[in-house]
Image (spheres, grey):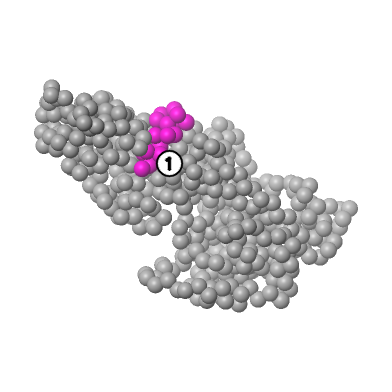
Amino acid sequence: VVEQDGEAVLARTARPERDPVLPLRAAAAAAQAALPLSPHAVRRMAATARPLPTPWPAEAREQLITLLGSGRPTVDVWEALEAEGLISRLLPDWERVRCRPQRNAVHLWTVDRHLIETAVRASALTRRVSRPDLLLVAALLHDIGKGWPGDHSVAGEIIAKDVAARLGFDRADVGVLATLVRHHLLLVETATRRDLDDPATVRAVADAVGSESTLELLHALTEADALATGPAAWSTWRGSLVTDLVRRVLAVLAGDHPGTEPEPAAPTAEQERLAIEAHRTGGPVLALRAQAEPGPPEEPAETGEPLGVELVIAVPDQPGVLPALAGVLALHRLTVRTGGLRTLRLPDDVDDDGSVLLLDWRVAAEYGSLPQSSRLRADLVRALDGSLDITSRLAERDAAYPRRRGRAAPPPRVTTRTAASRHATVIEVRAQDAPGLLFRIGTALEKAAVRVRSMHASTLGANAVDAFYVTSGTGAPLPPEDATATARVLEEALRA
């Protein structure tokens, strides 16, 4: 391959009909030189190049990896090969995802372009992993199952095994690539929707990943996939949660064996102070602290989203706290990301038999600046005593916005995850994101007479996926029949 008039062209001595690796070698050389491939050269190779043997020779695999690792120039070179059908000849499974639209509007690209964009993002992360070749190939294949019916991760695992074997990877590497494709959503979904303080959560991830080296690759693939999806799929906050989960899983894989029950963290001095003040005053006490921490300078700009605001509230234990707080936050246009709720026993020198409900939440302002904690407290007091009609206020605000025309949103779905925790029942809610959604969920859970131990809110585009760790009044997980009934009541309330 030589440069001519700003393009990569085939040398006069090139013989595509004798060299089946030439299309990959030419593509890799063009991408490395940041040159477009000559259309004439691509057409000639498409017309005369012989198919590669199965499995591929080592050189072919190395040239593919070089192409995928070339960064942004990979896109134009790949599209030139794809336009002449060379990609589908090299990777027959590619035809099912070629120009395939995405189901979720959060994606910026079609499925095939997203896979290449993921490889581009992964190429910037190769120095973080010990096997950059596996990272790049996993990036190329992670959504390959979207061309098949059913769960694309499950279908993709099967396809990845076949493709990896065809590329000439050995059995161990084939297994790693299959695991990466099968679990490419595991870290981000677990980090944003599950309680990381629950040993069952961390153990489940460790069992699925299996080794530290695979976890390292999965961490990088998760970030590359999210960055290639669009700005709504990745942020500093999501990155921090995934990093925290990876740290905990690494400890388990290294031999640390957490207990079967999560150990509640001891209250900080500030939390204890707030609890005592709430007990003495008989009303809620708030502490609101901004946690705006932009990402490191070397990260892409879209990862610099603030982590949010830590909101700590102590209030005498009483019914209705969750929906009241959720409603007040919705009125102030604050989005809830995570929320912990627990009962804190007061020190003996304060009260021998006193308890306070402690809420430690992370929230983010949708627009503008944060409200003053005094305003939040005043509205929370009114919500708890019933003088603030949150339902009417949210309805008035909703009515002020014009209705969007178009396809109706799919109905909400509520499921139980019985194996997700040993100490609580996990109820997962998937619904169209809207102001006051958490207030409606909290109200329904309050009527169902269950206690919310913690919650984990995750929003991707127009879809909210919120997980609630709930127990009975005695603090035990719900019996299966009660869990099913609670989920059904909650789903009916959201549909209404």
Per the picture, the main secondary structure of the magenta-coloured stretch is: helix
Q: Secondary structure at mark 1?
A: helix
Q: What crowding class fits label 1: few (fewer than 14 Cα within 10 Å), some (14-19), or many (20 or more)? A: many
Which residue in the rendered view is the most extreme toward the top?
13
Q: Toward which corner of the image does residue 391 lie, by quadrant?
A: bottom right
Q: Which residue is mark 1?
A: 224
Which segment did they paint magenta?
Answer: 117-132
Rendered view: 149 above or below 25 = below
User: Who's the residue at 57% across and 59% down the image?
Assistant: 366
Q: Tell whether position 207 is magenta.
A: no
Q: Toward which corner of the image does residue 84 lie, by quadrant?
A: top left
Rendered view: 134 above or below 200 = above
**339 relative position to 136: left or right:** right
Q: Tell whether position 118 is magenta.
A: yes
Which residue in the rendered view is the most extreme toward the right?
349
User: Who's the residue at 45% across and 29% down the image?
Assistant: 127
Q: Quadrant of the N terminus?
A: top left
Which residue is at the front of the view, 42 or 196?
42
Which residue is at the front of the view, 145 or 402?
402
